[in-house]
Image: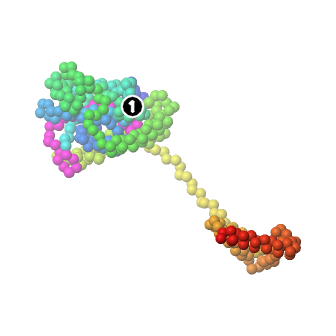
Amino acid sequence: MQQNQVNSILEETGFAYKRDGDYFYSEKNCWQRDFGYCRLYDELCPVFGMILDAEPVEFSYGGNRWLIKFWKGQYGITTGAEIGLYRSGSEDINSPRFRGTFYEAVPDDEMMELSFSLKKHGRVILRRSDRHFWLTGFLPGEFSEPRSLTLDAKIVFPCEDMAEVFAEALKGLGYTEREYSRAGAAVRIRYRKPHGRRNFWEKARDQAVQLVNYGNCRLYRAVTAPYTDTMDALEHLRGTAPHVFHLMWNALYPHAFFDTFAWLWEQLKPERTEPLKLPAPLRTPVQLPEPIQVLEPIRIPETAAPSRSSEQPPLILPIPVFVPRGERRPSPPPASTPASASAPASRPPEPSCLSELEGQRPAAHRGRQSQNRQNLGRQQQYGRR
């Protein structure tokens, strides 16, 4: 598959593929440009699998409120970064659903020279540079934690005064001289971690979403393992596993993401007679397998239970009985037998060896033993006295 064919397929998503660098990027005329930016977008990102470190830098210049924002992190099954330029000349929104500033994307004549290099554990994995309003780059199949990424960005402003105001805004957020520098109209930023605080629940939520992203990245790599070229991998992915193909674009600001804020757009543009039309979602015909024929369960005929012979009595197991020490264990009752079976005749007890010896002793000998016992008892009685 050629690069032009890939970009024609991705045109509906607002992104394109760059073979020299093996990454996806946003186009200047992408349809996401019409939706601008507001704080609610970042709050919805985890729902679509985007776990990001976001740093907004707000300042006022030339009668407008400006916002330059940096993002880096995991976008579903891609790792990437963004730099966005926005401005607002209207009042804040005050509604029950949202209170804050809505920023519009800057027009073409106010775009700036943007560039960045994205590092993972100190190694550069992505470079981008262009005159843009929204400079982005995404590596497919790469999994990263946002804290492991470092974004080294450079912005060339139209004049030095605007660059100085932006540098002061960075200083107000807590950036030190080691994290940014200004040389004329150019400002360099080293973005490692956000300077704002996050609560415990946000961290726990992000960890749960990252577990899903990690599994999806492994799935992408397993499906595209036979291909070394990303374009061939995408063609194979689109034909054999379209659900994985759509999984990639569902985490890059898809149509459903902005459909959630249709109410916000209607409030911002009440004079618009027609609602904003989004391009048709990217769909690929899926060939479903033939229906599986369900076989009827095999019924096993029930057989009558074998009748117990009347000649053999049922087996009765003895029940264990706890007998305290010093007491005699009662003899178990005789097992009941069916009426048809005849009870065996009782046998007389056999004489023991002692009883036989007692019977063999003469009567005189037995009399002397009893007299000796009586004498011994009398001696003990007198001795006690």
- At horizontal 39% and vertical 31% (from top left) the residue drawn is 139
User: Residue 57: where, in percent of width, then height?
Assistant: 22, 33
Q: Which residues are magenta?
A: 75-99
Snapshot quadrant of residue 197: top left
| Circle 1 residues within 10 Å: few <14, some 14–19, many ≥20 | many
Q: Position of residue 113 (x, y in %)?
A: 24, 25
Residue at the far top in the pictured view: 183
Closest to the observer: 321 or 118? 321
In the rendered image, the vertical position of residue 347 relative to residue 104, given as above or below: below
Residue at screen point 40% across, 37% down: 77
Q: On the rendered image, what quadrant is the N terminus found in? A: top left
Viewer-closest of 151 and 107: 151
Q: Is residue 284 visible?
A: no
Front in this rendered view, residue 22 or 313: 313
Query: Is 330 situated left or right of 150 in this image?
Result: right
Classified by dominant secondary structure, the portion drawn in magenta counts as: strand
Task: Judge whether 314 appears above or below 143 on screen.
Answer: below
Magenta-colored stretch includes residue 25: no
- Indicate whether residue 77 is drawn in magenta: yes
Whether residue 352 sits left or right of residue 322 in the image: it is right
| Residue 312 against residue 60 in the figure, above or below | below
Q: Which residue is painted at 12% across and 33% down in the image?
A: 63
Q: Which residue is mark 1?
A: 139
- The quadrant of the rendering that contains the C terminus is bottom right
Q: Quadrant of residue 8?
A: top left
For badge 1, the amino acid type reads: Leu
Q: Quadrant of residue 72?
A: top left
Percent across and percent down for residue 194 are 28, 34
Identity of the residue drawn at 70% across and 74% down: 333
